[in-house]
Amino acid sequence: MIGNKKLLSICCVGYNHALYIKDSIGSVCDYKYHNIDIEIIVVDDGSKDNSPEILKNLKESSQIPIILVLQNNTGNVGHNFNVALSKAKGDFILFMSLDDALCLEILETCINKMIDNSNLAFIASSKVVAIDQNGALIDNFTGLKLDTLEKPSAKDLLELEYNEFGAFYIQGCFFRKNIIDEVGGFDEDMLGDDIILRTKVFRYLLDHPEYSFEILKTPTFYYRRHNTNISRNHERQIRIVTEYLERYWPERTYPKILLLWVKNRLPFRESLSIFSLNAKTASLLKDPEIQDYLIKKVKRETSFLRFLFFKELQGNKRIVRILHFIKFSYTRKSIW
């Protein structure tokens, strides 16, 4: 809090986002605020373009305080957000990537709601507006399943994380900072970031029913789609969710959506690399749909994988197991 006003800390991370910085935090700096104070914390993850120079110039000219962290590249989004969080002094936190842009007209409205209701843990949106690299609207962008639910509970949000790999985007979501601190921020030892934080917050709410949340039917940010979105790296995305499921849902089988992702998003050889993650992931090969997919794919290959390797942790030892995988003459029944 600065003076009598509440403080919002906007925590930003970016890598090679020079083209979009003006639209993202540049627009935040130019907007006129009345009832809140704002600080911006930016972590640039070793950009190779001129992002650092743009950010330095913006910091010098901005009327809003900007804390700038220029670091060597880590590729660890969760770690980078935690760095920003460690410097944040706000009562409220808003996360964003430097290639996205905020719907500024709703910003003060959301913060005022959280000021008026001290038990409001977060305000998120079920609406996503996607824009291309030039800022033009993308009409055919897939919406969120959350938008079809009326008055979802924290348990409902958790089920969306498990079944859909996402309830909402953390960009444009307003969090109460003490709750982010309570759950420990992001898990830096995992590849994923937003899905981890949401799950931790939702589980916290289940244990603390005094807190509530609000889901808006209006957008709070513009999600920019371009060729370098890390979400376009499908193998990385599947590794994120298999790692996530292993830690946060160890007692449950893999959801159907993971099978669809493997079948529909990955080339054959990358699919096989996914199965090498751990014993539980390798068990996906027992699914009839996956077996059909791999058999059809392998018949189109000039060469094929005969053995499947995967690692299994037993105590402190990591055991490499070898499974005899597939031959042209095999039937599905003879694989296992």
Image (cartoon, rainbow, N blue to C red):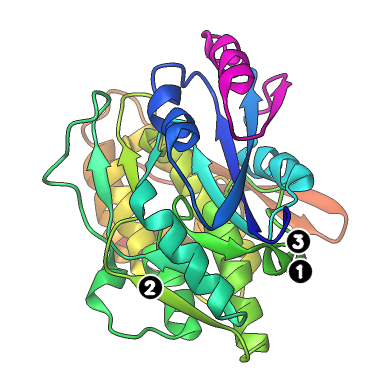
**Between 195 and 53, which is closer to the camera in this rendering?**
53
Q: At which x and y percent is residue 13?
A: 58, 34
Q: Which residue is mark 2?
A: 215
Q: Quadrant of the N terminus?
A: bottom right
Rendered position, 75 above or below 281: above
Count of marks, rendered view = 3
Rendered position, 26 above or below 87: above
CA–CA distance in space, label 3 to label 2: 23 Å
Horizontal side of 320 relative to 162 (left or right) equals: right
Dot 2: what SS?
strand
Q: Which residue is mark 1?
A: 182
**Tag 2 or tag 3, which sits nearer the N-term?**
3
Q: Which residue is mark 3?
A: 184
Q: Is residue 220 magenta?
A: no
**Between 108 and 285, which is closer to the camera in this rendering?**
108
Q: At 66% from the left edge and 34% from the top edge, which residue is drawn?
A: 65
Please indicate, yes or no, whether residue 168 appears anywhere in the rendered image.
yes
Start-end of magenta stretch = 47-74
